[in-house]
Image: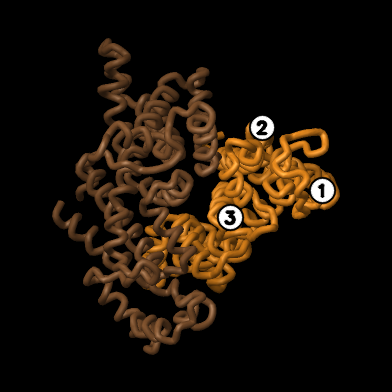
Chain colours: A brown, B orange
Amino acid sequence: MLTFFGKRLLQLLPTLLFVSLIIFLLQHLLPGDPALVMAGEEKDPQVIAQIRAQYHLDQPIPIQYLYWLNGVVHGDLGESLRIKQPVLDLVLEKLPVTAQLATIAMLIALVIGIGAGVVSAVKKGSAWDYGANAFALWGISTPNFWLGIMLIFLFSVRLGWLPASGYVSLFEDWRTSLASTIMPAFVLGNAIAAILMRHTRSAMLTVLDSDYVRTARAKGLPERTVILKHAMRNALTPVITLGALEFGTLLSGAVLTEQIFSIPGFGKLIVDAVFNRDYAVVQGVVLVTATIYIVLNLLADIAYVLVNPRLRT
Amino acid sequence: MVDTTEQELLRLALPIESADSPRARAIRALLLRKAAVFGLLLIMLFTGLALLAPLIAPYDPTAQSWANVRKAPSLAHWFGTDEVGRDVLSRLLYGARASLMAGGISIAIALSIGAPLGMVAGYLGGFVDALLSRLTDAMLAIPFLILAIALAAFLGPSLGNAMIAIGVSTAPIFVRLTRAQVMTVKVEDYVEGARAVGNPRWRIAVVHILPNIVPALLVQATLSIAAAIIAEASLSFLGLGQQPPAPSWGSMLNSAQRFLASAPWLAIWPGIAIFLTVLSFNLVGDGLRDALDPRRR
């Protein structure tokens, strides 16, 4: 088991190294002299000189990368040109906001996705099944920013039930927090719910057709027990680990959702940075997002192996 | 020697055999799926509307009219007008061009990067495979839209750069898929046979392996077009795709946000257009996957 963890951790290193290389090379996509482009409208020679020194732009690219990597390893993701704050501080400040949104979104996705998937498989070929499949197709085909706009139109503009924007931490005032988070969380969780529904349905159909479920039924167990205790327990293991992998989709979706609902999180940070040409922040957000995704991937793998002893060898 | 009667029989048998080829069977299986046919019809409809936009659009999509600011749908403007008096229907029709073009071109970019790299990784194996696989893992570790936003931000905002950003961000999926497919196919007897008779590597890859992995790539490409259309709309929504005043469904939704209370139609039509286009590619992609997979037929 320990060998597995060790191997898996070792595999992470080259991936992280490549991620860092890709993110570093992004700044070299800038047309012309990166220092001039990064300085934006302001052509102050002092600012340009500061950027050149900060990014070691007068050095060869491999040396620049090593400087940058050394900084990253020591927690230095650079400094925001606009806010004049370390990028890491900015990211850490925004992270809890997106984490709260993403967690509620994932809970919504798990409840809807697994619920619809199980019902769809158990009632295969019925109106429930068609309805759940239609929901899944709708979920993966609807752009979440449009869904967000439509929900704001309905629940904020027309009915006035929920706030159209803003963010309150759960620890400050949980009622206001839930009221302001429920719409963006649903928007964010909707597409994942659709994906989870499809996987749950497929996994449940396989399990329901297996010998041990047939045996459980033959023993005369009530259908409810067969489904909830025997079938679901086995069918949901891969689905839940898949849910962890879908966190990447959540972080992608958060960019647009936070923009629409004016939530001051991670996604809004990267969009604002893009428009302020604050490239160090863009790089920092991408790096932290990728690292979170890689770590969640590792945790999902470990969880999968922990619940599947056959995979431990 | 084959006599004339036998030759005639063979000739007659050919069409039957070709009609029953895997491709013909897959097309038949696809056309039997109502949802996929509906999707195909929708794609044809949207493509037709996009191509014929200059002929059928009732107004110039960029022509502003201060006398017609935010007019509700009427006989003169079927889908209403926007915040500067432009006809929403005309902008939708021209916007279809940006969306479909972005979907098609970005996936063509993804395929042209991903498929050859996947072939090389899968066929050569060893160090090249390890290197390309780690690079793919690294790119897949960065959430798709975040990578596309970062690329589009550094390349500069434009529809062309958005397509490059989406294409490059989607490429790792095709590297991984092609690699897996090549690894399965390269150990088949007919590939071993081609190698045994002395075919060069490139010929084995292009003539013997590639045709057999096309169906899997086709399914993924169709589903990826759907994702690319959403990604283009997302980038345009953020201001990183199609630049104003050129119409795009994403940027139309962006400006619609400010007028939700007074002009909700501005947000409704572009959203429905994106939804239907994405839905159509998803339906065809699902249908193709089922039609090309014998276990699902």
Identify the amino acid type marked 1.
Tyr
Q: Is residue A137 visible?
A: no
Mark with earlier residue (2, 1): 2
- Secondary structure at numbered mark 3: helix
Mark with earlier residue (1, 3): 1
Mark with earlier residue (3, 2): 2
Image coords of residue A278 (percent x, y): 42, 68
Residue A238 in the image: above or below residue B203: above
Drawn side of residue B39 relative to residue B15, left or right: left
Quadrant location of residue B270? top right
Give the residue at x 70% y 57%: B246
Mark 1–mark 3 distance (CA, rounded to whole Å): 22 Å
Q: Which mark is residue B32?
A: 2
- Secondary structure at numbered mark 2: loop
Q: Is residue B37 visible?
A: yes
Q: Which residue is at the front of the view, B136 or A153? A: A153
